[in-house]
Image (spheres, grey):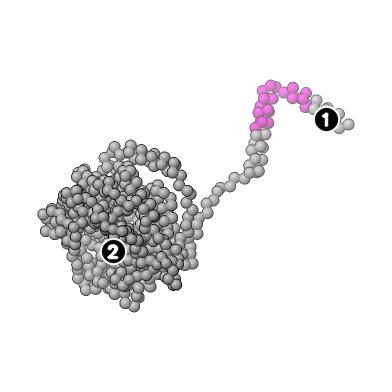
């Protein structure tokens, strides 16, 4: 019975359908198809719900601030992809390089609208240091805060010039304006004074150029040109490798009083500044002379990219039996290989290649581990036989920051693992001391000693000179990773400075970081304490890290930011 009823209903529906006008039937068919498509989409959406992917953020909160930061996983390097990316980047930079370098200067960053609480503490430290300097050492190189007097070395107002861009960055307008007035009216270079080419370049020339870029005030560039014209005499050697000293009045250069050779780090850590001076003036002489040195050293024999710490200015050859170290007299050679490459828009391949080869050499010849905690450190090779010595300078602690900067710019990813581990070791050399301050030199135990001590400090090496290197690296590591553990470590170091280095009229170096009872104040406030240490602490605690992005600025060895060019 049911099939018969169904057939009847079908016939009725079909008959009525045929009675409809053709246009009406077409419209009804289209509406039906649309309804079917919509129904299909709804069913599919319910079957496979759309979920916004979430990225889990690593938890950097630690119960103990000496816990190492988590080692973030690094995918293996794909050499072909890396070379392809580098080639594309370099081609793009070369295309941009046809433009005048002076057009590539980035505008000064806007001053921060609001400081963090920790930044306010650093600003208070800067104002305290400045007040003591202004009261007892105004216009002189260094303050002696305990004896309330001053110290002169180069007679160039080092502390004041070194601090110019720090004052500007911290928005200390009153202090900056009084410093600018002194530069305009009292800073003169026509002195019958032998000055160290390297120290004068990174502190004074670098400070003037940086302040010019930040403020665009012509007086700072005028002073930089006057100084640069005098310092360029340092390159008048038999080989083009500069002498250590230059007389600012006679413009004659000479070897250092302590020996016949120049320090390798000194002759290779003036290129950023001289190149920048050429770019902002249009005078190529400064850059040509400084670049010649880098090209000359590129051609010299090395130990897998590692270099001796002395070179003869007349012959241009190494002192072959001299030490290989990442510390004093060697350190910033490696730093400036990378930073020159960045400054020149990543267009000079030999700088990148020499840098990468040197890191491989560090791993193969200098890297070692401690007992019992397996801490990574970089030792030294001494003498003609290149015997390994298990010591590391505080100066070497610039390296984690440099390695991290290199990885940011495409260097092998495993360099970041080295940076993380060495950063932890450097931090230990500070925070395992009762003062939370690092000694000048640390010796590391590479064999079991039956104790829990990974390292020890000799009496003559226990001083802290208000150095910035570890804090510098903490800023790079935080700037590039966002890991707040690095801020925590820096804050503990700053508390050590506040507790054991702060005195009534400024801050002082101390002679013994191993004692909280008698840290032995040394009565000297180095210029780099204001130029570097406090600046890097301020940047470390800055909420907005974009203002001094390493994509726009390259910091010289004295923490003076200079612009990155296209070529």
Dot 2: few (<14), some (14–19), or many (≥20) neighbours within 10 Å? many
Which residue in the protein does label 2 denote? 529
Front-most of residues 139 and 323: 323
382 w.r.t. 15: above or below = below
Question: Toward which corner of the image does residue 111 lie, by quadrant?
Answer: bottom left
Which portion, as a residue range, is magenta?
Answer: 12-35
Disc 1 secondary structure class: helix
Q: Is-magenta flag for residue 244?
A: no
Front-most of residues 81 and 229: 81
Q: Magenta stretch mostly in which secondary structure?
A: helix
Measure how far apart labels 1 and 2 are at the Cα level. Answer: 97 Å
Which residue corresponds to the image point at 66% horizontal and 31% vertical from the top-left?
33
Examine the rendering and report whether any part of residue 8 can be seen: yes
Which residue corresponds to the image point at 55% horizontal and 48% vertical from the top-left?
53
Which of discs 1 and 2 lies nearer the camera? The answer is 2
Quadrant of the image containing the N terminus: top right
368 w.r.t. 337: above or below = below
Q: Earlier in the sequence, mark 1 or mark 2?
A: 1
Q: Specify the label residue 6 is tagged with.
A: 1
Quadrant of the image containing the C terminus: top left
Which residue corresponds to the image point at 29% horizontal and 60% vertical from the top-left?
383
Residue farthest right in this picture: 1
Dot 1: few (<14), some (14–19), or many (≥20) neighbours within 10 Å? few
Spot occupied by residue 309 in the image (x, y as percentages of width and height):
27, 57
């Amino acid at each position: 019975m049911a099939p018969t009823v169904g057939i009847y209903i079908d016939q009725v529906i079909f008959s009525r359908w045929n009675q409809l006008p053709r246009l009406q039937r077409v419209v009804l068919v289209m509406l039906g198809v649309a309804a079917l498509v919509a129904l299909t989409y709804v069913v599919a959406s319910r079957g496979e719900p759309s979920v916004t992917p979430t990225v889990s953020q690593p938890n950097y909160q630690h119960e103990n601030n000496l816990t190492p930061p988590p080692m973030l996983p690094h995918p293996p390097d794909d050499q072909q992809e890396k070379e392809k990316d580098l080639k594309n980047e370099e081609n793009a930079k070369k295309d941009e390089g046809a433009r005048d370098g002076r057009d590539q200067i980035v505008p000064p960053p806007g001053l921060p609208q609001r400081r963090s609480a920790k930044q306010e503490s650093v600003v208070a430290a800067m104002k305290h240091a400045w007040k003591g300097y202004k009261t007892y050492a105004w216009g002189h190189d260094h303050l002696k805060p305990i004896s309330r007097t001053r110290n002169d070395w180069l007679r160039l107002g080092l502390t004041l010039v070194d601090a110019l861009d720090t004052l500007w960055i911290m928005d200390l307008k009153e202090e900056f304006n009084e410093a600018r007035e002194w530069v305009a009216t009292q800073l003169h270079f026509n002195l019958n004074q032998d000055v160290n080419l390297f120290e004068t370049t990174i502190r004074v020339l670098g400070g003037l150029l940086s302040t010019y870029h930040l403020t665009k005030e012509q007086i700072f560039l005028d002073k930089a040109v006057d100084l640069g014209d005098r310092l360029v005499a340092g390159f008048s050697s038999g080989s083009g490798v500069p002498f250590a000293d230059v007389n600012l009045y006679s413009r004659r250069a000479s070897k250092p009083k302590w020996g016949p050779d120049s320090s390798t780090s000194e002759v290779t850590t003036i290129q950023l500044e001289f190149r920048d001076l050429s770019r902002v003036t249009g005078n190529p002489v400064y850059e040509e002379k400084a670049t010649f040195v880098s090209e000359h050293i590129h051609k010299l024999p090395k130990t897998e990219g590692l270099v001796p710490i002395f070179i003869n200015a007349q012959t241009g050859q190494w002192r072959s039996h001299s030490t290989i170290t990442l510390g004093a007299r060697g350190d910033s050679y490696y730093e400036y290989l990378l930073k020159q490459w960045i400054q020149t828009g990543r267009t000079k391949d030999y700088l990148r290649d020499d840098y990468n080869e040197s890191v491989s050499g560090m791993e193969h010849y200098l890297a070692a581990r401690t007992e019992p905690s397996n801490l990574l450190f970089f030792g030294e090779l001494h003498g003609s036989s290149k015997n390994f010595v298990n010591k590391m300078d505080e100066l070497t602690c610039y390296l984690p920051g440099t390695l991290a900067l290199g990885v940011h710019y495409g260097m092998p990813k495993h360099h970041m693992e080295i940076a993380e581990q060495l950063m932890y070791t450097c931090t230990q050399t500070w925070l395992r001391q009762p003062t939370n301050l690092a000694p000048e030199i640390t010796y590391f135990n590479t064999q079991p000693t039956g104790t829990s001590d990974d390292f020890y400090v000799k009496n003559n090496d226990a001083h802290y000179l208000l150095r910035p290197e570890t804090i510098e690296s903490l800023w790079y590591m935080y700037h590039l990773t966002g890991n707040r553990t690095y801020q925590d470590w820096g804050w503990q170091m700053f508390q050590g400075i506040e507790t054991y280095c702060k005195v009534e009229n400024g801050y002082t170096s101390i002679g013994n970081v191993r004692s909280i009872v008698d840290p032995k104040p040394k009565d000297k406030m180095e210029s780099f304490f204001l130029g570097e240490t406090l600046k890097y602490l301020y940047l470390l605690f800055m909420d907005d890290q974009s203002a001094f992005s390493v994509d726009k600025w390259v910091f010289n060895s004295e923490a003076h930011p200079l612009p990155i060019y296209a070529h």
